[in-house]
């Protein structure tokens, strides 16, 4: 498969360039970059393996690029100087670099190879289609790594009239997501290896990558921890009792200690019921219900060394607490949903139960604090909390009787572009970093946030400036207040494992 004439964005390396990209055997194998002298081809079949950090053998430089010093790396003041190899060779006396042993040189004097497994050529700035090769014209489109959503509910098993693994995967692909993490609050709960193994097996048939977080406590009852070791061995990528707060402080600490030993994260739904009169609205579920648990878990994470994720953060004070915990050295991630950075409690008067979720929409001050947290890095990632419900359940006259939650996979990217990028709060690269690199880092997934030869061919192609009216969802459910709104950034194609998962 050949993708032609796209704007290639690599949030993992913070690079942007025009060019072509080839996919073979589920991997990115070649990239041709316009307006530079660089052409990159990965030798087959020796694909580069993934790592949690940007791979050293996938770096390159050219006359139009500069390299940002990595941690502990010496910096040279000369603008065109380059790091040559892993053993810290530098050149600052000349603009030309002598190839190291076994290193392929590039025809342009200012470009240097940094990878043993790559071949470079300056003879072409474009890729020519091979015989019988599918060609996607990405003119006017951004080509980026596939999005990752660490917080979805596919209602499978137990409530498959709302969603199932297959329709959830379809919705994910339509929204540009190639990897999702399902929560454990299904019926029955994902608290045992038999159910988890069955889900993992069925997920392999779907067009996107579906991963699973297992429950922290048996039956989500908050009383007894599950068998973390067995669940991790069966495929759990982390642990969460999402939908229910973990109220026992000692149990929360024990869970963090176990997860820390396994090197897996814990994700927390932070709403203390002692402060909630009725869920789903700010006036009856105030921010203190969130703040008190965020403060506790940030300090427990600091003292246990565990990696934790504060889910769907909604309170300005909680954002400040996370900021403080990070400054103290706690390994705390925080996620924001598109609805919390896009809407306030005022949306309830217009959209009713379609604006009901847990935690609730809050004030404009809270929304602005979330945006600032995204901007300054306090909030690491964007996650949808995709929560399908049937129309009959949502269309009830009793607001508080309706289930909480909205779908979000098919509008998340567009809401980020519309409400964060276009107003200037984030750059497009920064938005994509929060939807690719950061979620991958939370779960120690392979390096999905970088476009480079050897990387998995998980991609999204979209037009950031294309307006469209939200609607026509692939999900089984349609419970969202964003239906009918004009948004920007329509997904044109999603590719997962080198295969087209969605195409418009």
Image (cartoon, rainbow, N blue to C red):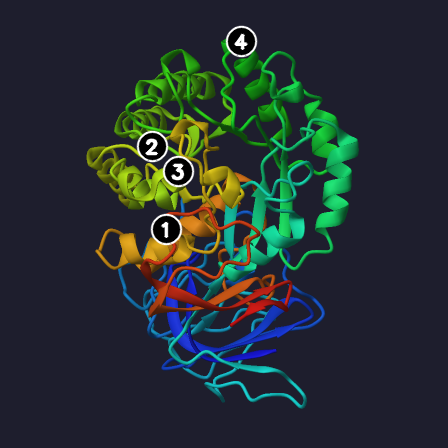
Q: Which residue is mark 3?
A: 353
Can the viewer see residue 40?
Answer: no
Q: Against 395, is 208 above or below?
A: below
The span from disc 1 to disc 3 (Cα, nearest Å) is 56 Å
Give residue 8's position: percent from left, percent from top: 43, 70
The span from disc 2 to disc 4 (Cα, nearest Å) is 25 Å
Q: Nearer the viewer, mark 1 or mark 3?
A: 3
Q: Residue furthest front?
A: 397
In terms of sequence position, does the residue under pointer 1 or pointer 2 come before the other?
Answer: 1
Residue at point 53% right, 16% down? 252
In terms of sequence position, does the residue under pointer 3 or pointer 4 come before the other?
Answer: 4
Q: Nearer the viewer, residue 469 or 199?
A: 469
Q: Which numbered disc covers residue 485?
A: none
In terms of sequence position, does the residue under pointer 4 or pointer 1 come before the other?
Answer: 1
Q: Quadrant of residue 233?
A: top right
Q: Nearer the viewer, mark 3 or mark 4?
A: 3
Q: Of helix, strand and loop, which one carries label 2?
A: loop
Residue at point 46% right, 17% down? 300
The span from disc 2 to disc 3 (Cα, nearest Å) is 18 Å
Q: Which residue is mark 2?
A: 314
Relative to residue 372, is residue 382 drawn left or right? right
The span from disc 3 to disc 4 (Cα, nearest Å) is 36 Å
The span from disc 1 to disc 2 (Cα, nearest Å) is 40 Å
Q: Nearer the viewer, residue 207 or 18?
A: 207
Residue at point 30% right, 57% down? 418
The span from disc 4 to disc 1 (Cα, nearest Å) is 45 Å
Q: Residues within 10 Å of mark 1 (few under 14, many from 20)?
A: few
Q: Residues within 10 Å of mark 2 (few under 14, many from 20)?
A: many
Q: Which residue is mark 4?
A: 250
Q: Nearer the viewer, residue 50 or 58?
A: 50
Q: Which residue is mark 1?
A: 74
């Amino acid at each position: 498969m050949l993708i032609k004439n796209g704007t290639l964005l690599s949030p993992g390396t913070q690079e942007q360039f025009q060019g072509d990209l080839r996919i073979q055997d589920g991997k990115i194998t070649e990239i041709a970059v316009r307006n530079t002298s660089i052409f990159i081809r990965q030798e087959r079949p020796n694909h580069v393996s993934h790592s949690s950090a940007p791979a050293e053998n996938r770096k390159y430089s050219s006359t139009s690029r500069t390299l940002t010093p990595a941690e502990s790396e010496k910096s040279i003041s000369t603008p065109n100087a380059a790091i040559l190899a892993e053993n810290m060779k530098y050149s600052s006396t000349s603009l030309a670099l002598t190839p190291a042993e076994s290193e392929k040189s590039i025809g342009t004097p200012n470009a240097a190879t940094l990878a043993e497994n790559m071949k470079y050529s300056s003879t072409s700035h474009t890729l020519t289609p091979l015989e019988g090769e599918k060609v996607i014209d990405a003119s006017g489109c951004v080509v980026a790594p596939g999005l990752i959503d660490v917080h979805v509910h596919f209602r499978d098993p137990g409530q498959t009239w709302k969603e199932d693994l297959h329709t959830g995967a379809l919705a994910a692909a339509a929204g540009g997501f190639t990897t999702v993490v399902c929560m454990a609050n299904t019926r029955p709960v994902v608290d045992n290896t038999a159910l988890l193994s069955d889900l993992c097996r069925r997920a392999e048939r779907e067009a996107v990558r579906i991963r699973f977080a297992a429950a922290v406590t048996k039956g989500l009852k908050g009383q007894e921890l599950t068998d973390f070791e067995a669940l991790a061995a069966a495929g759990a990528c982390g642990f969460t009792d999402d939908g229910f707060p973990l109220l026992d402080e000692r149990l929360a600490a024990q869970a963090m200690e176990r997860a820390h030993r396994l090197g897996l994260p814990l994700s927390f739904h932070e709403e203390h019921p002692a402060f909630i009169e009725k869920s789903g609205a700010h006036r009856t579920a105030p921010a203190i219900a969130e703040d008190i648990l965020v403060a506790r878990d940030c300090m427990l994470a600091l003292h246990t060394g565990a990696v934790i994720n504060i889910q769907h953060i909604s309170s300005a004070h909680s954002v400040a607490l996370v900021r403080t915990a990070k400054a103290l050295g706690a390994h705390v991630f925080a996620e924001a949903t598109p609805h919390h950075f896009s809407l306030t409690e005022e949306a309830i008067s217009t959209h009713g139960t379609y604006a009901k979720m847990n935690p609730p929409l809050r004030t404009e001050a809270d929304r602005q604090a979330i945006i600032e947290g995204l901007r300054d890095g306090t909030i690491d990632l964007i996650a949808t909390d995709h929560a399908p419900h049937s129309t009959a359940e949502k269309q009830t006259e009793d607001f508080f009787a309706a289930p909480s939650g909205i779908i979000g996979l098919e509008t998340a990217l567009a809401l980020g572009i519309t409400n964060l990028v276009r107003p200037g709060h984030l750059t497009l690269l920064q938005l994509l970093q929060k939807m690719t690199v950061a979620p991958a880092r939370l779960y120690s997934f392979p390096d999905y946030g970088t476009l480079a030869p050897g990387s998995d061919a998980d991609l999204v192609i979209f037009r950031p400036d294309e307006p469209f009216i939200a609607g026509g969802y692939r999900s089984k459910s349609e419970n969202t207040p964003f239906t009918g709104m004009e948004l920007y950034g329509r997904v044109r194609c999603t590719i997962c494992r080198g295969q087209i998962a969605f195409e418009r």
